[in-house]
Amino acid sequence: MLPFIRIANPLFILTPISCLSEIEHCQIVCCNELSDTRYQNLFRVREAKNLGPVSGPNRQRDLCTLCTISLDQEEVFRTKVFDKSVSPFYGEDFYFEIPRPFQCLSFYVYAKSVFQRDLPVGKVSIRKDDLCKYSGKEHWFSLHPVDPNSEVQGKVHLEMRLNEVITVTGSMGQHLLCQGLPLISGQNCDPYATVSLVGPARSDQKKTKVKKKTSNPHFEETFSFEVNYFCVLHKWFNSTYSYMKIRVLLPTVYFCRVDLWNNENLAQDVFLGETRVPVKILRNSHIHKAWYLLQPKGNGSKSKSDDLGSLRLKLTYIEDTVLPSACYTPLCNLLLKSPDVKPISASAAHILGDICRERYEAVLPTVRLLLHHNRFVPFVSAVAALELDNTQEANTIFRGNSLATRCIDDMMKIVGKNYLAVTLKPVIDEICESNKTCEIDPVKLKEGDNTEVNKENLQGYVQKVFSSITQSSSSCPPLMCDVFRSLRHLACKRFPADPHVQYSAVSSFVFLRFFAVAVLSPHSFQLRSHHPDTEISRTLTLISKTIQTLGSWGSLSKKMVRNSYWPAKTKREEESVDFLDEISSNISKESSGLEDAVVLKEGLVFIIIQKRGQGRKHLGKKNFKKRWLRVTNRELSYHKHKGKEALCIIDVKNIQAVEKLDESAFNRKNMFQVLHSEKPLYVQAGNCVEASEWLEVLGPVSRCNEGRLSAFHPSNYTGGAWQCCRSQSSNAPGCKPCTTTVLANLQLDIDCDRETERIFSLLSSNDTKLQNMEDACASMAVYQGPQREQEDYSKFTIQEPKETFQTLKQLRNVMEELQKQHDVRSDTTAQYGSLTAGQSEASVFHMKRNHLGGVGLLFSFLRLLSSLCPFS
């Protein structure tokens, strides 16, 4: 038999799907109109317990530890270092969406070292397919050793052929394409492949050429191996197998092995992964084509990990299978009609909130959908009016956890993100960095603390926070102002005799549910990168409680406000009233244009620096310089080091577009470009999540600029032509549409299909409650049957049984049709080792839409506890 293995051009090329950006016709050959799967989670890294000492010559009892989170082999987050404690409390929350396919989520625990690299204690790895198994419950995971040969990612496409030329010889061909190989030191690797045919008494190996700086190598080589039946007959001469039986069994004892390596010129090559395919797979067919995930060396041999400890994790995992847009049109239209339904309790959106009132997150997809279609204000006004009709006392207005309060809470978190950053981030940074003691409780005072000094510190902090809030009316998003104006009008109408209710209706949201919560937990609102320590958390708690009291109009007579650390109550009340007037009346305070610049995001990146006279022809590795990138609400700048003078400043108003850059442009991942009046600014972020965050920050602050581009070039201009469209003019218009602009008062991207699918999932999971509500309507008005006891339907808000029943019927019909669409497409799931398995594993799907906002994953682990032992 004469097998040969050919490594040639790929069967097809697929484009990575991105999150919160636009991608044009991400179409894969051999894929029809498939659904796509999108994932969402949130996780928190809490604490570790009983950490063991480091072994070795520098043995110490207490470890300085940290925990990192990685997607495959790409680190995306790390906790702060906890100094010398066997029970460190990390207290970290990470909320993010993953803008690329991945195979595995990993947690690494490291011991921080001063004079050498961080020492790995162990890791916990969870495959994407296994995440749903651990959703909603706490689990203890054993820590496993960090073995370099097990740190693999990526996949390989194989095309194999087996053709017998004569009775005792044959040929086997293989077509190979690799994708998704890891980054080496933050850059694309230099991969090569070794191909082996392994069988009885032989293991021949061939090697491909090295491909430079790519994670998706295409190989163009042919290898041949010789296997002879007579050699096998001679080896098994004394056996009972006949010649014909050996010919049948021979393919079962041979397998093809492909190993991927990163070429290191002056060091040992790095193993990237392997895959093994038995030749017997060609028994029924002479051609085999399939995608295979790269595996650890030796298929990941298990190492003893009993002495490494364990981690306790709790995650909430949500998986949405999103269908084509046309499938969601009926349900979307039914939800968008909700503000016009009379009474509002008979609308589809209200029914959803009614049956999911125990689930706080159930309201969010409805809010996002209504925001996108500019239908939120009329809906929340109608829902708030319904709540006020059932409110008997003015001092309890909007104090419960109702549908109206939940909708407004979610709206403020979505729309007011930048507002919080502009208003609170500078003063929160000052509080966290100055770290003055503010404890005033005699029971909690430490030895040596001075109560009077602490009161002065607290009063100074409260003054700064309160002034920042009351002077921020010009920055309040117009949509929030529209909602507050409506609430104020409804409250005055419901309680005309109370002159203060118009203020308490607004302050109960903007102070109690917005600013005070953000001060208490700045990390949850992206105001700080890490949770503050215990002492600063206590200071923020005292400030938050004071802000709540000052902003609560109905509580201004409380004793806390009259405390000695807050004496000037009359002036503060006047400032509060003026602020509430400005954000809830038709006449708003105009911006003076002299506001201080507020840092929205900053961090280390790589930026292409073009030397004078170099032009665009020879941009290489030496042009990538590490710089400190900083974006404020006024300008984008980069510096040689943090705190140094700016090397380049770009006015935010002059930014024409912020878009992703193709990997092929500079053979680097996680790159984006800032287009303005001069040369484009090319930036490489540290990882995929960080790149997505930069786009999220730069997009909203520049999206409503005048002179924005309608199209851009996703690649660079080099060699006298744009590499994307081959246009030879450097001033040629873009060949790809820019990210679609949105309303100026929202400045956010919302994937309506994903939100509608989430609503469908919520309705489906509460089908029993829908049926009970339908029966209650029927019992009350539709049918003349026996009346049920009031308790059977008192949990639902049913004002007009007939209207509610009709809406429920419409919902039922829409849900049945959507379920049929899901059932039809559920059969298209690809299997591992099949022609489309690579697409399935990589979560790459055929899209007809340009906008793919929200493709990704959001992890939520509510607790992380570990018990670690010594390691070597």
Image (tube, rainbow, N blue to C red):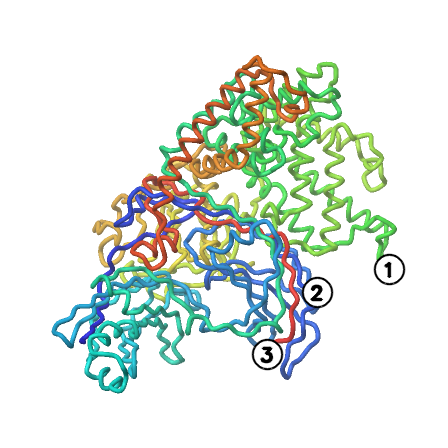
Residue 715 in picture, x, y percent from top left? 31, 53
Q: Is residue 592 visible?
A: no
According to the picture, the residue beneath numbered tag 2 turns out to be 87
The amino acid on which the numbered mark 2 sits, given as a three-letter code, is Ser
Between tags 1 and 2, which lies in front?
2
The quarter of the displayed image where residue 276 is located: bottom left
Q: Amino acid at mark 3?
A: Ser
Q: Which mark is residue 447?
A: 1
Q: CA distance from mark 3 to mark 1?
A: 41 Å
> Position of 729 compared to 67: left or right?
left
Judge the density around disc 3: few (<14), some (14-19), many (≥20) Cα neighbours within 10 Å.
few
Give the residue drawn at x 52%, y 57%.
603
Image coordinates for residue 301, horizontal then vertical, percent: 47, 73
Dot 2: what SS? loop
SS for callout 1: loop
Q: Quadrant of the N terminus?
A: bottom left
The amino acid type, in three-letter code, at marker 1 is Glu
Query: How far is mark 2 from mark 3, CA to CA?
Result: 20 Å
- Label 2 crowd bin: few (<14), some (14–19), many (20+), radius 10 Å: many
Position of residue 669 relative to residue 234, above or below, is: above
Which is more foreground, mark 3 or mark 1? 3
Q: Are marks 3 and 1 in contact (CB under 8 Å)?
A: no
Res 872 label: 3
Rendered view: 726 above or below 564: below
Mark 3, secondary structure of its residue: loop
